[in-house]
Image: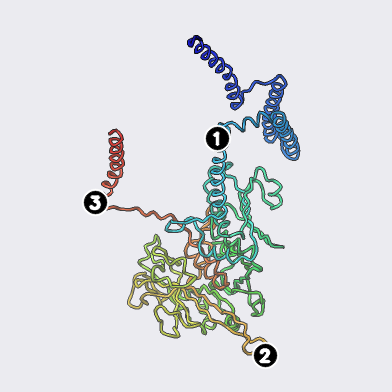
Amino acid sequence: MPDKSKDKDIQEMRAKGAQRRSEPDEASESRRHSGHEPRSDSGRRLLWISNGLMILGVLLLMGALGVNIMLAGSARVLWVRVVAGAAGVCFLAAMVMGYRDLIRWFRTRATQEGLLSLAFTVAVWAIVIFGVYMGQRYSHRIDATKDRLYSLSDKSVAVLDGLSGQVEIVTALRASARPELAQEVQRAKDLISLYESAGRGRVRVEHLNPDRHFDRMNELGIRKTVDVVVVKSLDEGGQSQTLQLYDATNEQKVTSAIMGVTRESKPMIYFIEGYGQYSISETGETGLSTFKKLLEDDLYEVASLNLMTEQGQIPADAHVLVIAGGNQPFPEEHQKAIADWVNAGGKLLLLAPNRLLDEEGDAPDFATILADWGITVRADVVLDPDSSSAFSYIPVASGSGIGEHSITEPFRTRSASVPLDPLVTCSLRVDSQAPEMPGQPPPPGQPIVLLRTHNLAYSKTSREFTSATKEASDTPGPLTLAVCASREIGSTIGMDDEAELMTTAKVVVIGDEMLAANGDIRVALGVYQRSPSRAFVLNCVHWLAESEDLITITPKTDTSQPITLTKSQRSWNRLVCLLSALVPLVIGVSIWFVRRA
């Protein structure tokens, strides 16, 4: 009878042997899946060579980066290409020699999960980069400041919208070399960036480093030692204009430069001289040389005109005539020539002389020129006892005394005022052709009051007055100080009566002969300071020359608006702050207790 216990022991021994024989197979399978299968000698050599090529490729890439930093010009491009190409060859050879290990590496679970994470990360970064690119390409800025500090004025935007060609603005500014001007340099660059954004492709901006871009600066004629901005038209035969640093921070100057380089021709302004008028060549206190420079900065051509030498003929290229004062008799035939020229579509700016203070009594009243316009220059002196100035009795127009017109638009603010010269200003009489209708435009040709004093002002009409105090014989205010008028003139062309060439005749009369004199225009750091009265007379020229886009752009100031809370509002504010801190704390503690339970 067979021994059953021995058979059982034999079976157990056979099972253990089979188990021991299967263990190497499982281990080898595990090593195969984990990439640690034993290699032959040739396989190990290929692995070492592949790893060495990979390390060499990384070193060559680092060398290419070093070459790019150290060399310059064409040599840098050549050597970077050579070294980077050698690195690429090393990487390719390493992949070919170790392709089996690479395949096994890709099959492992850890590699597949890592590649999936890498793909997800790359996708997220691609979305972020695409969003940044789209934001820069199609950006839109919102200026929430009250005075629109970070936006261009409507006039500048209108000029940019009207451009038919492209304009290039090139900056050559150094902030690091002159730390005291760093703020001005940044202001200029910020302003120019606004033009680039509002230009919508019509304005191209280029920033030059004066210490590096020598060829480009020589091409533009820029000296290395100055900080300038060049405005240039990209049209064929286009002009260019160079702005100093202080001008480049002024929106008025930049807009004027853009108009100047894109304008086909410059308006011609003639100053009539020869009868005691102020001269544009005179550099003294009573000269007009500074005012001439201001006009030339706004891209006008300025010249003097003596009607005696010209036999009373007005040049055909004249856009605007300016008569600044006068203390000698103005011939009647010359007045009639000017009146005929204006009535035919000319433009005239008259700074009326004060006839009351003329000792000889020869100052003209220009009645012949102004007869058709309903304007009369009075023989008086305007005094304003409530001018609140360091100099007493300065005539000032402010508030409701500033009329509604494009000339006065920049001054129609609550705090704006336009002062005129004391003991020189005379008043004007306006003969209205129709009753004034509130809110309605005046009839064609009717004068429009630009500046008017308040009720406390008065005028002296006697040449022998010895006291500035108001007397019974004085003319009470309000008194008119400046007026303008315009009317359309039609001229028939050919035989067709319906074909007419329409032009506009314009007149501006100001009762201050010294409003544009040198003594009233301050110069600081090489920049002409445009006070309100000088800006006003410049606006008159812009309106007459039909360059209303150049009408002075009001400087912007950062107006602070503090918030003042009442006692009740401060209590509610503290309560809201306290609750905003306590509510999250209570919610967090409650969640913690719930999880503990």
> Percent from the top left, x then y, of residue 463?
42, 75
Identify the secondary structure beneath mark 2: loop
> Percent from the top left, x then y, of residue 482?
46, 73
Number of disc labels: 3
Q: Tell me if 95 is positioned left or right of 252 in this view.
A: right
Marks 2 and 3 in Cβ contact (< 8 Å): no
Question: Which residue position holds label 3?
Answer: 567
The picture quadrant where one finds residue 100 is: top right
Question: Which residue position holds label 1?
Answer: 113
Q: Tell me if 450 is positioned left or right of 199 in this view.
A: left
Residue 181 visible from this viewpoint: no
Task: Say whether disc 2 or disc 3 marks the residue closer to the N-terminus.
Answer: 2
Task: Say whether disc 3 or disc 1 marks the residue closer to the N-terminus.
Answer: 1
Between 138 and 452, which is closer to the camera in this rendering? 138
190 versus 271 height, above or below: above
Per the model, the C-alpha gap separating discs 2 and 1 is 90 Å
Question: Which residue position holds label 2?
Answer: 495
Residue 257 visible from this viewpoint: yes
Q: Residue at x 51, y 84 (%)?
A: 371
Task: Say whether disc 2 or disc 1 marks the residue closer to the N-terminus.
Answer: 1
400 versus 447 height, above or below: above
Amino acid type indicated by mark 1: Glu
Amino acid type indicated by mark 3: Lys
Q: How many other residues sit within 10 Å of disc 2, few (<14), some (14-19) or many (≥20)? A: few
> Percent from the top left, x then y, of residue 47?
69, 24
Q: Residue at x 55, y 66 (%)?
A: 158
Per the model, the C-alpha gap separating discs 3 and 1 is 62 Å
Identify the secondary structure beneath mark 1: helix
Identify the secondary structure beneath mark 3: helix
386 versus 104 height, above or below: below
Mark 2 vs mark 1, foreground winner is 1
425 versus 376 height, above or below: above
